[in-house]
């Protein structure tokens, strides 16, 4: 048996057919990653300047769809196909699936920035979803031809979790039409999709490919079926934390605690032998491709350790109320584990180029990931400790994030180079073209069926249509007219001075910087939530203070707050702000309105 260092540095040569399909597959995957990083950079810019052409939530939806359904989906599906499918005729099917996936993702990229969730964006995202079903159908058939091992079982379940995650998408349309987008079940459906996508489909795909790589190189995989089932159970139990974001019930925290404990057990049984065999423990590798794999595996370890800390209910609450923690955690899975973990396997198998140019790009990507994670998690910790903001934090985070598109551009440009084909490869390419011509009619029928199913899903999601069922809930304006202008809560009356109390306003700004600016801006531009400019001219001071101190009840009972939630689609967390602190924040909002609009307290008059 070869020694660990020899095996790690060895890069198997891809077959001609593999290379011919892998090149466009990874070309488009990296392209969508590049586009996702540019939209992500634009999101960062919202915190340091004004953007007049796009709405923040539209940019957010574009970024997330390109990252999940563009880069993540294509990277994982491509790596699975090239690992387990070698038949040239079958690869034709995946070539067509790639084409439809690229078409649908391009459609999302061009529609989401301008309309958010609308007719075209829902049509293209639905087309992508139906195409993923075809991929699952064909790939599970191909996987069944392989001997059952730990890698094949993990990969099979990764496909199952991808299908399971889509149930959340199918539920969104009917729940939104019947119960409304403010109902907890609506939020639970969204979280169901994200949870089983990230922690199921993507993580299982990475673990399956890791186990397959170890097995291929002659190392043992001492993972029992019992350990695999522990992993499955933990996946379902940890969904409880996502549910608690919209439905804060104490029992959910205990269910999540059991889940994260089981997850740590399962991950340790899978990753410990992998680290031992690949890196002789935790020794940092010298080969740059192995360093990328090391980052991917360590990110998965960090994910498990962070989730383990959430067994304490108070810590769990902090984790989802501080937005920087949420973003950092998602990036830890998506950028850390998936990008560097599975990306390393793509590099090792020559599905991605491995020259110095690309290597430089990957190192910039790693630097961007590490810097942004340190900034996000570090700033989140400072907020938790009530120590304020890192000086010029939004600008520093923007600069760190700019390394993402720079590194990706280097990687993507490297994929433009045309490889030299020998006569055997040219013959295979001609065979592919002949077979593709023969199967044109079948593929056309498949595409028509796919489009039909996509339109059906679009209709169920309410893709811009006016009539979405027999039940028509009252409009946002009608509900707001019925609302108590003072809101729901203890604050019934607020005394305001004729001028701004500078001392109170200064205290209010410190609290607002600490707990509010991650989601709100001081101008009239919406970030995650609406901008603060003009709020004292639109809302009574009692309403503002009740919204700050009694947020959960306000979102459940106050029509004005519910209308804002339906507009923003992000539930404001309870920051446990006291009445005294809320009064300080109100005073700063009065000062902000006076400086920016020339007036304040119009709603109180």
Image (cartoon, rainbow, N blue to C red):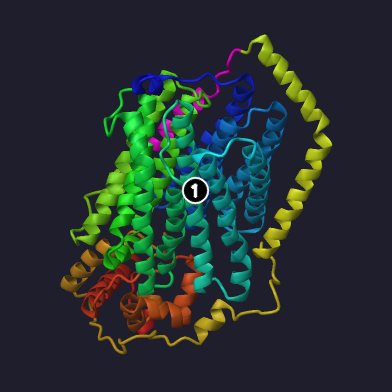
Coordinates of residue 485 in the picture (x, y in percent): 41, 85
The total of numbered circles placed on residues is 1
Name which quarter of the figure residue 280 lies in: top left
Q: Which sits in the foreground, 251 or 521?
A: 251
Name which quarter of the figure residue 360 lies in: top left
Q: Which residues are magenta?
A: 397-420
Q: Which sits in the foreground, 86 or 191?
A: 86
Coordinates of residue 530 in the picture (x, y in percent): 42, 66
Name which quarter of the figure residue 534 lies in: bottom left
Residue at 71% across, 18% down: 428
Residue at 44% across, 79% down: 556
Instruction: Identify the main secondary structure in magenta.
Output: helix
Coordinates of residue 353 in the picture (x, y in percent): 49, 23
Determine if residue 316 is in view: yes
Tell me: residue 335, above or below residue 219. below
Tell me: residue 369, above or below residue 486. above
286 magenta-colored: no
Q: Which residue is mark 1?
A: 63
Determine if residue 516 is in view: no
Residue at 25% across, 86% down: 495
Label 1, residues with CA under 10 Å away: few <14, some 14-19, many ≥20: many
Tell me: residue 503, above or below residue 493. above
What element does badge 1 sit on?
A: helix
């Amino acid at each position: 048996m070869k020694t660990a260092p020899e095996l790690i540095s060895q890069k198997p040569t891809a077959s001609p057919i593999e290379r011919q399909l892998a090149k466009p597959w990874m070309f488009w995957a990296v392209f969508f990653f590049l586009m996702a990083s540019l939209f992500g950079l634009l999101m960062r810019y919202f915190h340091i300047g004004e953007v007049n052409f796009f709405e923040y939530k539209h940019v957010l939806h574009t970024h997330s769809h390109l990252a999940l359904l563009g880069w993540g989906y294509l990277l994982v599906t491509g790596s699975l196909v090239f690992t387990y499918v070698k038949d040239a005729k079958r690869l034709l099917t995946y070539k067509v699936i790639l084409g439809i996936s690229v078409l649908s993702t391009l459609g999302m990229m061009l529609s989401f920035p301008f309309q958010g969730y609308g007719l075209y964006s829902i049509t293209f995202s639905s087309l992508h979803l139906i195409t993923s079903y075809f991929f699952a159908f064909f790939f599970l058939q191909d996987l069944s031809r392989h001997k059952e091992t730990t890698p094949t079982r993990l990969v099979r379940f990764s496909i199952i979790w991808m299908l399971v995650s889509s149930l959340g998408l199918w539920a969104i349309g009917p729940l939104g039409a019947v119960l409304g987008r403010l109902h907890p079940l609506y939020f639970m459906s969204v979280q169901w999709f994200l949870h089983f996508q990230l922690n199921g489909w993507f993580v299982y795909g990475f673990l399956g490919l890791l186990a397959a790589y170890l097995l291929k190189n002659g190392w043992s995989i001492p993972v029992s079926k019992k350990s695999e089932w522990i992993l499955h159970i933990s996946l379902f139990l940890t969904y409880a934390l996502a549910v608690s974001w919209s439905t804060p019930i104490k029992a959910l925290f205990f269910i999540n605690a059991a889940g994260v404990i089981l997850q740590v057990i399962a991950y340790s049984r899978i990753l410990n032998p992998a680290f031992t065999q690949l890196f002789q423990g935790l020794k940092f590798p010298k080969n740059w491709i192995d360093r990328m794999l090391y980052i991917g595996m360590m990110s998965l370890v960090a994910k498990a350790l962070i989730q383990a800390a959430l067994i304490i209910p108070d810590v769990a609450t902090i984790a989802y109320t501080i937005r920087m923690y949420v973003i950092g955690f998602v990036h830890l899975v998506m950028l850390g584990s998936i990008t560097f973990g599975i990306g390393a396997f793509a590099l090792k198998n020559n599905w991605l180029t491995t020259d110095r140019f690309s290597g430089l790009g990957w190192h910039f990507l790693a630097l961007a990931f590490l810097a942004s994670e340190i900034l996000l998690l570090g700033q989140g910790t400072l907020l938790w400790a009530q120590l304020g903001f890192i000086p010029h934090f939004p600008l520093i985070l923007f600069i760190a994030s700019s390394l993402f598109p720079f590194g990706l551009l280097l990687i993507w440009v490297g994929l433009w180079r045309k490889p030299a084909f020998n006569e055997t490869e040219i013959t295979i390419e001609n065979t592919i073209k002949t077979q593709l011509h023969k199967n044109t009619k079948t593929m056309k029928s498949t595409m028509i069926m796919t489009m039909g199913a996509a339109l059906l899903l679009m209709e169920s999601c309410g893709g811009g249509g006016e009539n979405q069922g027999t039940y028509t809930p009252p409009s946002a304006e009608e509900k707001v007219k019925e609302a108590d202008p003072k809101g729901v809560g203890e604050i019934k009356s607020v005394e305001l001075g004729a001028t701004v109390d500078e001392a109170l306003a200064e205290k209010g700004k410190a609290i607002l910087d600490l707990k509010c600016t991650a989601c709100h801006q001081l101008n009239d531009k919406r970030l995650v939530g609406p901008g603060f400019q003009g709020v004292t001219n639109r809302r009574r001071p009692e309403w503002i203070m009740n919204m700050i101190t009694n947020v959960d009840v306000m979102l459940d009972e106050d029509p004005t707050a519910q209308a804002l939630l339906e507009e923003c689609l992000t539930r404001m967390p309870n920051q446990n702000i006291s009445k005294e602190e809320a009064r300080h924040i109100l005073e700063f909002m009065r000062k902000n309105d006076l400086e920016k609009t020339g007036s304040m307290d119009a709603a109180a008059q």
